[in-house]
C-alpha cells in the first residue's frame, strides 16, 4: 500500500497485445492495447495504484524471424538484446495508449516505461537442459545447420509437422530486479510504471559485481511475481485469455474455480490439473505471491479485469 492506496501488480498476457488469429500488425496491436488501457483507467478511477508487466513472446518471435531473414545483410542480435528491443516496443505501445486513455478521461497521469534487467543464477539447473522454445519453426536440416553454425540448442517440438524443430533456451528462475530502487522511486512519486516486460532481460552477476546479459528467457509469470514481491504489492492480477482457472480444462466435466486457498491450489498443481506450458506457471506465481504476504492473487481474462479485481469474476487465490 502506498499513501493509503492499494497497489495492484498487473501481469498482462499476450492476448492484451496480439489476439489469436491476427497477423500482429502495428494497427492490430495498438487496437488491442487501447482496449486494455480503457480497463486500466477504470481501475485507476476506483482508487487503485498500478504497476504493469507484460509478455513479449509473439513480438520476440517475430523479431527473431526478421533477424534470420536479414542475417545476410545485418548482424543478428543476441537474445538479451532482443528482449530489450521488445520491452521498448511493447512499453511504448502501452505508454502511448494509456496516456491517450487518460487524456480522453480528462486527466494527465505520469507514466514511464523502464527497461529492466532480471538477475538469474548462471548455475540454475535449466542451463543444463534448455527447454523453452523461441523463434520460428525449422525443418530438421535447417535446425541442425543452425546448431552447427550458431551453436543453437534445438529440439523437435511438433513431431509429424514439416517444420517441427525449434531453438530452445534456458528459462532460469528470477532472483531480483537490477532496477528495483528506480521502480520504487517512481511508484513513490505516483508514476504508473511499465516494467519487467517479457520476464525482464536476463543477466548474471559476475564475481566483480558486473552484470552480463545471457541467452535465456525468464518466465514472465514468475518474473511478475518477483516484481510484485519487490514492490510490496497488495494484489497480483494476472490477465490472460480465459475468464477463470478450470478443473478438467477442455473436458466435458470442466469446472470453473471461483476461489481456492494456497493449499487447494498446491493440491491441484500436484494432481496435474493445470497445463505446464500455460496455466501452471500462473498458478505457481500466484501461490508464491500469497505465501510471501500478498493479500490475494487473481487470474482472469483482460475483458473481465474490473469485475475480477472487485471479486465478482475470475479465480482468486487466497491465504489458508
Image: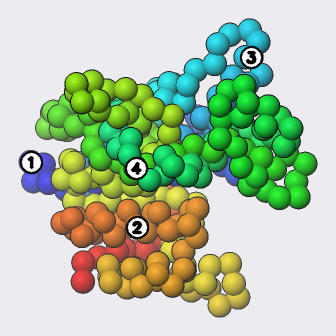
Q: Nearer the viewer, mark 2 or mark 1?
A: 2
The residue pinned by badge 1 equals 3
Q: Nearer the viewer, residue 223 or 153?
A: 153
Q: At numbered mark 2, what does the secondary structure look like: helix, strand or loop?
A: helix
The mark found on residue 124 in the picture is: 4
Position of residue 299 relative to residue 42, above or below, is: below
> CB of mark 2 within 8 Å of CB of mark 1?
no
The residue pinned by badge 2 equals 284
Mark with earlier residue (4, 1): 1
Gap between marks 2 and 3 measured at Cα: 39 Å
Estimate how packed mark 2 is, as few (under 14), some (14 to 19) or many (20 or more) residues with alpha carbons within 10 Å. some
Mark with earlier residue (2, 4): 4
The residue pinned by badge 3 equals 70
Residue 293, can we see it?
yes
Tell me what residue is drawn at x 29 percent, y 32 percent: 205
Q: At numbered mark 1, what does the secondary structure look like: helix, strand or loop?
A: loop
Gap between marks 2 and 4 measured at Cα: 18 Å
Residue 309: x and y in percent read 35, 64
Amino acid at each position: 500500500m502506498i499513501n493509503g492506496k492499494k497497489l495492484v501488480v498487473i501481469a498482462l498476457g499476450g492476448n492484451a497485445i496480439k489476439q489469436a488469429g491476427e497477423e500482429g500488425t502495428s494497427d492490430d496491436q495498438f487496437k488491442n492495447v487501447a482496449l486494455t488501457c480503457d480497463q486500466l483507467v477504470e481501475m485507476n478511477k476506483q482508487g487503485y495504484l498500478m504497476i504493469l508487466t507484460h509478455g513479449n513472446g509473439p513480438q520476440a518471435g517475430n523479431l527473431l524471424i526478421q533477424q534470420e531473414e536479414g542475417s545476410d545483410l545485418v548482424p543478428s542480435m543476441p537474445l538479451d538484446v532482443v528482449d530489450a528491443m521488445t520491452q521498448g516496443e511493447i512499453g511504448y505501445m502501452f505508454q502511448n495508449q494509456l496516456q491517450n486513455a487518460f487524456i480522453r478521461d480528462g486527466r494527465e497521469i505520469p507514466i514511464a516505461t523502464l527497461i529492466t534487467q532480471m538477475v538469474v543464477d548462471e548455475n540454475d539447473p535449466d542451463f543444463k537442459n534448455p527447454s523453452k522454445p523461441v523463434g520460428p519453426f525449422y525443418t530438421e536440416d535447417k535446425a541442425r545447420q543452425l546448431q552447427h553454425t550458431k551453436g543453437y540448442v534445438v529440439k523437435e517440438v511438433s513431431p509429424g509437422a514439416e517444420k517441427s524443430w525449434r531453438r530452445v533456451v534456458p528459462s532460469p528462475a528470477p532472483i531480483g530486479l537490477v532496477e528495483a530502487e528506480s521502480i520504487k522511486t517512481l511508484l513513490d512519486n505516483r508514476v504508473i510504471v511499465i516494467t519487467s516486460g517479457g520476464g525482464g532481460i536476463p543477466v548474471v552477476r559476475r564475481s566483480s559485481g558486473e552484470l552480463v546479459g545471457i541467452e535465456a528467457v525468464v518466465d514472465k509469470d514468475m518474473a511478475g511475481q518477483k516484481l510484485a514481491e519487490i514492490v510490496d504489492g497488495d494484489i497480483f492480477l494476472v490477465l490472460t485469455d480465459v475468464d477463470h482457472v478450470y478443473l478438467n480444462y477442455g473436458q466435458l466435466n470442466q469446472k470453473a474455480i471461483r476461489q481456492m486457498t494456497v493449499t487447494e491450489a498446491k493440491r491441484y498443481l500436484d494432481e496435474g490439473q493445470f497445463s505446464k506450458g500455460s496455466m501452471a506457471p500462473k498458478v505457481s506465481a500466484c501461490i508464491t505471491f500469497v505465501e510471501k504476504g500478498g493479500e490475494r492473487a487473481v487470474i482472469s481474462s483482460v475483458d473481465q479485469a474490473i469485475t475480477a479485481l472487485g471479486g465478482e469474476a475470475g479465480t482468486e487465490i487466497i491465504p489458508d
